[in-house]
Amino acid sequence: MAAHNLSPAASVDVLEKQPVLGGCLSSYHMDQYTIERYYHHCFPTDAALFSLLEKLGIRDRLEWRSGTTGYYVHGSLYPLTTPREILAYPHLSLLDKVRLAILTLGARKKDIQTLDSITAEDFVVNRYGRNLYESFFEPLLASKFGEMRSTVSAAWLVSRIAIRSHRGVSGEHLGYLKGGFEQLIGALEQSCTAAGCTIHRNEPLTELRKNGEKWVVNGRPYDRVLSTIPPSEVERISGLTMPSIPYQGAACMTLGLEREVTEGIYWVNMKDPAPYGAVVAHTSFVPRDRYGESIIYLGSYFSGKPSAHLEERMLNDFSRRFGAAEADIHWHRLAVDRFAGPIYVAGYQSLIPEYEKNGLYMAGMFSRPNYPERSMEGSIRAGTEAATLLKNGLGS
Ligand SMILES: Cc1cc2nc3c(=O)[nH]c(=O)nc-3n(C[C@H](O)[C@H](O)[C@H](O)COP(=O)(O)OP(=O)(O)OC[C@H]3O[C@@H](n4cnc5c(N)ncnc54)[C@H](O)[C@@H]3O)c2cc1C
């Protein structure tokens, strides 16, 4: 995104350590279709994304669909989309359901700034009761942040609830790009290269240092550098002192299946312990006939390293729990990214770096527009804002 904004004005090189572009938004290229390595959808509030799609001439591919949700508890799958389904859910008392409704309805009006310094656990326990926290929110936080769950800020939780409250009775209004978000990555690549930008795939950043007025990057001199990788990685490679943003990794298995297994529900949160925290049934969201098979994601997050034998454990657990026989599974792949998102600990706002420090520009998942939840929208805005600042300083 930064390169897209800079290429017309400057001579730009992009360094990408992977053979493919897109980072967390990259896709698998199957014979008949492409599919994101990690489940993706967009939200009705993603204005910068929509205007980018417009500029790239692919806005007509944006489609709106309904995303239904459910909870997997004590071996059973409970749909939790409509008010009737929520009322029928047996693992929460009526009082807790009322409290949950109050929290959900009020989420969009809450002041995110003041919630940054409180943990989600304290916020829910103190205002809505321990039972609602333990029986509803803690398993969700655990599946997303694991052992770090009690450090996560109330700002993250509340904004997450707010962003996910654009819903009708049939589900949440979620957007998708016909043909996949690979269309966006491809169109961005095309527009960058057409504007003269050079993209170096398979080239990790290994050297970053100042030499007089210039920066030296992997042996080449540059006037300006804009980094989009985790600040801790920049520090490791360059020795420059960077803000310590805590990150978590994601491990996500994608499976091509003979049949649906989530009773038509798009997003199933696992309350029962499992090697994955959510089952995301892509083809309960986007029509199955586009793929000729069902597509399921098993999503998990980790701190440090993924747990041992994760692929095998995920596959075995999924097959047993959802009754998928060997013949039902056409293929499966595991994607692992150590830096899949910041952990939004209480007080996170004070860690967010400026776009420029000591002549180095930085924009990414850790930037302000990605607070308090990282997204395509946040990184589009961060890349654009940092590039604008860099462009303004080019004459100096
Ligand atoms: C499981 C999951 C689900 C998600 N779902 C959604 C969703 O539904 N909707 C949504 O809006 N967002 C979603 N996101 C977030 C979205 O994918 C990210 O916010 C967005 O892709 C961030 O983009 P980025 O470019 O800032 O960072 P990244 O995607 O992390 O890109 C960083 C790039 O830098 C490269 N790199 C790293 N180190 C080096 C190095 N040393 N040298 C050179 N290159 C390097 C990486 O390979 C990568 O290409 C999801 C993310 C995950 C992990």
Image (cartoon, helix red, strand yellow):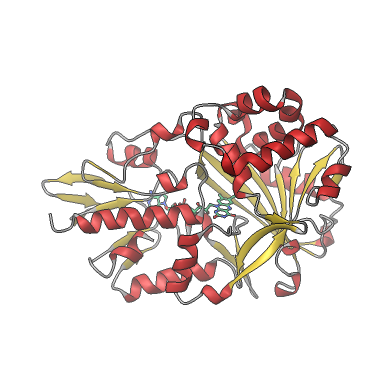
Q: Is residue 40 left or right of residue 66?
A: left
Q: The C terminus is located in which quarter?
A: bottom left
Q: Residue at x 61, y 65 (%)?
A: 176
Q: Residue at x 42, y 73 (%)?
A: 55
Q: Can the viewer see residue 183?
A: yes
Q: Position of residue 260 (x, y in %)?
A: 82, 61
Q: Position of residue 352 (x, y in %)?
A: 39, 38
Which of 335/229 is in front? Answer: 229
Q: Is residue 130 above or below residue 185?
A: above
Q: The N terminus is located in which quarter?
A: bottom left
Q: Is residue 166 above or below residue 89?
A: below
Q: Is residue 140 left or right of residue 347?
A: right
Q: Position of residue 359 (x, y in %)?
A: 21, 45
Which of 157/199 is in front? Answer: 157
Q: Is residue 266 left or right of residue 56?
A: right
Q: Position of residue 302 (x, y in %)?
A: 59, 38
Q: Residue at x 73, y 70 (%)?
A: 287
Q: Is residue 41 left or right of residue 221?
A: right
The number of callouts visible is 0
Q: Is residue 253 above or below residue 186?
A: above
Which of 256/94 is in front? Answer: 94
Q: Can the viewer see residue 218?
A: no
